[in-house]
Amino acid sequence: MHLFCTCVLSLSLLMVRATVSGSFKDCSHFFYMQTPPAGIRGASLKRICQKYADKLRYATLYDSSRRLPLYSAYVFKKSDGKRRMDTPWMYEPQLVSDNESGNMKTLPFTQDTSPLIEDSQAVLDDYTDAIEYRRGPLNPDLHQAEPDDKSSTYTLTNVVPLITDFLDTSWYPYLDIIRRRLNNFCHGKSFMVTGVTISGATIQRDNRDRLVIPKHLWLAYCCPRFDRNSPYEVRFMFPTYAGYALNELAGHRVVEVPLKTLQSFLKSKTDIDSDISIFYKDCVSENPFKKKRRDLTSVSV
């Protein structure tokens, strides 16, 4: 009996620690209908259940050969839009070693950064001489409400190199538009996926290619339960809508489009399959009247 309990305990600990693996099994609740996007390829993919302060926060598909997250999936939390300014940048220890704990860790000072960390993921030094670029989050802190959820977005496995002007004048304002839209008109969970398309350009350090620069940045949301009396100008943007923009010095206005239009756009891009699917069945709207009838039937039975 003692041996059986010990085995069960060991298995339980293993399941808690295994946050980087070949599947998103432990963090599938961050995806609509627990179904991750399909049709996104990469050279060396790692599926990260992002864990901070002993709690799973969101999910990231990470291409370790390019040191680039291909997408992060998270659940939007009604937010005041304030950003954290006091959180140190972190890294994913399990990309370094399977023996590490699942919690993301603060990056050491530059001179103390292990070669094992540099080989497996981006580090702060990669951005030092990349004057035109800044770290742009896929899961942004302004889409989270709790302090720890905000802090968890400050890991280099959740950010990509973005043109500074594009980030400040186009992407951040767009994220705030989405925040206000979902705050006001989404009545249930809103499942978010933010991703990139790949370009041939890279950021180099010491004459080595270190980071692949995204060509485009895109975002899609799925809010199955929403305000059906919302104003006309936003009603057609539910239950799902999307946007994308060019990560360049000019021409980087965000284009908002239906989900299917975004998926059609992505099909022609590198490492995207023709059968790409961001949300299960393209996000199905909940019928509140049917749900109410089901609940009444359950009560009567």
Image (cartoon, rainbow, N blue to C red):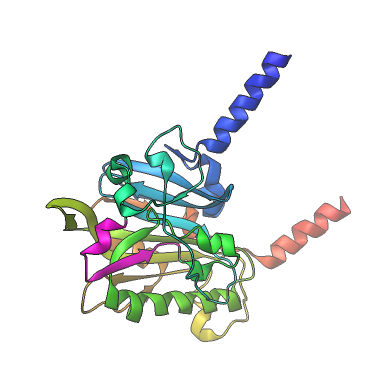
Residue 139 appears left or right of 145: left
Q: For residue 128, which quarter of the picture?
A: bottom left
* Residue at image point 27% right, 42% down: 119
Quarter occupied by residue 289: bottom right
Residue 123 percent location from the top left of the image: 31, 53
Quadrant for the N terminus in the image: top right
**Above or below 98: residue 272:** below
Task: Give the percent coordinates (x, y) of residue 277.
Answer: 40, 54
Magenta stretch: includes residue 24 = no
Name the residue nearer the viewer: 278 or 21: 21
In this picture, is 220 found above or below 66?
below
- What count of labels does the image hold? 0
What residue appears at the point 50 percent right and 39 percent down from the top-left corner? 101
Relative to residue 292, is residue 174 depicted above or below? below
Q: Residue at x 44, y 74 (%)?
A: 175
Give coordinates of residue 53: x percent, y percent: 57, 51
Range shown magenta: 124-139
Is residue 278 visible in the rendered structure shown here?
no
Q: Is residue 255 left or right of residue 59?
A: left
Residue 19, horizontal then vertical, whole percent = 49, 41
Q: Is residue 197 visible?
A: yes
Q: Work out which residue is located at the far left of the displayed protein and give it.
A: 207
